[in-house]
Amino acid sequence: MKFEQLIFKEEGDTARITLNRPDALNALSIKLSDELVAAIEMVRQSVSVKFLVINGAGNNFCVGDDITEMDKWGNANMIMRRVRYYQNMANQLEELDKITIAAVDGYCVGGGLEITMACDFVIATERAQWGMPEVDAGITPGWGGTTRMARLIGRRRTKEINMLGALQKARRAVEWNLWNRLVPDEMLDEEVEKLLEVLQSKHQQGLRQFKFMINRGVECDLYTAQGFEALSAALTGAINGMWEIDDADKGAGVSGFWDKDGLWQNRRRLAQTFWTD
């Protein structure tokens, strides 16, 4: 697919998306948003890509939705549809079975900050600035600025960020568990590559399981979350060779359906009309 407002590259097991509207501080135009949706879908469908790095061109990450285009969004219903479209984009990014890294430089506000909150890791330069200034444009965030943020830094600080609209220093994002690590301004790319090297050395199925159970577990009660841990432990055992269970089918049920053998026929005979009267 040919992109006009972002750069998409695949290098081995790593995909890279660069938001490429530097003259507009990489503001998310309608077109750029559509292209970002398409690029994330390409990554989602790939079986060879295991990592995704997102950054911005021109020493800025992203200043969020292009407010100059908001009059094109339409009426209240169309606005809601577009917000849900953006929410789905963030959800798809968060749900990727790849490890995602946001590499942040310069401004990272509004929708740009919402992108980082859907990523697994965030590395930022010391000069980076972040915030949710929508309040001063008379609008509210739509795809993570209140929801994911509150889950990451708590309600009180989320109210501070959204209701005041101040631009914060990068260090505070690390102190508040919003981002992972700060690096000198000229070291961002190098630190991203170092993180990739560490992640590439890991058991990739293990990383996928960690991501799934942490993302899902944090949204539910403790006992349900522990269920994810237990199932993940069993899956880990299975893929490490300890898959045989004495009273499991070992595929006999599926092959029995194909062949309509005695096992399958006996099971269906016993079950088909049981308690159906």
Image (cartoon, rainbow, N blue to C red):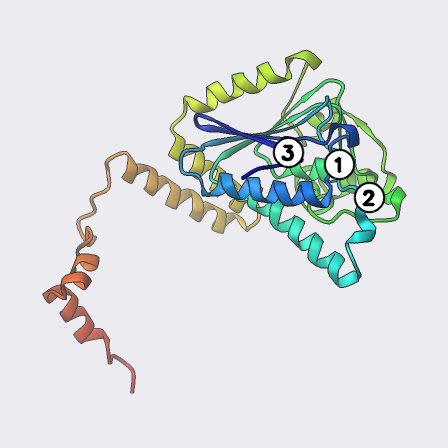
Q: Are marks 1 and 3 in contact (CB under 8 Å)?
A: no
At a point 28% along the width and 40% down the height, the residue shown is 238
Residue 153 position, x and y percent, is 70, 37
Q: Are marks 2 and 1 in contact (CB under 8 Å)?
A: yes
The amino acid sitting under disc 1 is Ala
Q: Image point 52% across, 47% down: which residue?
A: 222
Q: Please tell me in which quadrant of the rendered image residue 73 appears.
A: bottom right
Horizontal side, residue 100 vs residue 134: left or right: left
> Where's the N terminus, which quadrant?
top right
Secondary structure type for disc 2: helix
- The answer to which of marks 2 and 1 sits earlier in the sequence is 1
Q: Which residue is mark 2?
A: 67
Q: Secondary structure at mark 1?
A: loop
Residue 142 vertical position relative to residue 154 in the rendered view, above or below: below
Circle number at residue 6: 3
User: Would you name the residue on which mark 1 appears?
Assistant: 27
Quadrant for residue 27, please give it: top right
**Quadrant housing the C terminus:** bottom left
x and y percentages locating residue 159 in the rendered image: 80, 43
Mark before the other along the chain sequence, 1 or 3: 3
- What's the CA distance linking mark 2 and mark 1? 8 Å
Q: Is residue 28 left or right of residue 99?
A: right
